[in-house]
Amino acid sequence: MVLCAGYATAATKAASKTARHGHHKGKRKGSWKKKGQQGINSERATEIQQALIREKYLTGEPTGTWDARTQAALVKYQGDNGWQTKVVPDSRALIKLGLGPNYSAELINGPTKASAAATPSTTASRGIEGTAAKQ
């Protein structure tokens, strides 16, 4: 095999690239951390079951255990509302069932007009004072 200046075989290029960039083809060190909620506790399962019973997607009494029957009912509820059914529970389903976060109207929309009208505007008070001073 004849090599010219500036040319190298594919094996030589691959070996030098790995050494240069520190690529490793072994297992990762450490473990993957699971993110998000890993399970549903019994209190939350009871709340979800009560809401599904109220909406006629589940029958009987709430058991407080997240079982296949509860999951199937929630999958049907999510599907009937046009939402994804792979991840259960979906946040939109919980909100529609009345189990989502409780945001007050003031936090979402800001202060109401009645409370804003109770505090005088600084420009309005300056305008009155300026008019009184001119007379």
Image: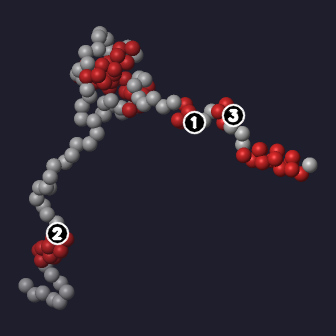
- Residue type for callout 1: Asn
Q: Which residue is mark 1?
A: 109
Q: Nearer the viewer, mark 3 or mark 1?
A: 3
When asked about the image quadrant of residue 66, the answer is top left
Mark pair 3, 1: CA separation: 17 Å
- Residue at image location 51% in from the left, 30% down from the top: 104
30 or 89, which is in the foreground?
30
- Residue type for callout 3: Ala
- Residue at image location 23% in from the left, 20% down from the top: 65
Crowd rating for badge 3 (residues with CA inside 10 Å; few <14, some 14–19, many 20+)? few
Numbered mark located on residue 22 in the image = 2
* Mark toward the start of the polypeptide (1 vs 2): 2
Mark pair 1, 2: CA separation: 53 Å
Q: In the shown orientation, is residue 100 left or right of residue 39?
A: right
SS category of the residue bearing label 2: loop
Q: Which residue is mark 3?
A: 118
Crowd rating for badge 1 (residues with CA inside 10 Å; few <14, some 14–19, many 20+)? few
When asked about the image quadrant of residue 16, the answer is bottom left
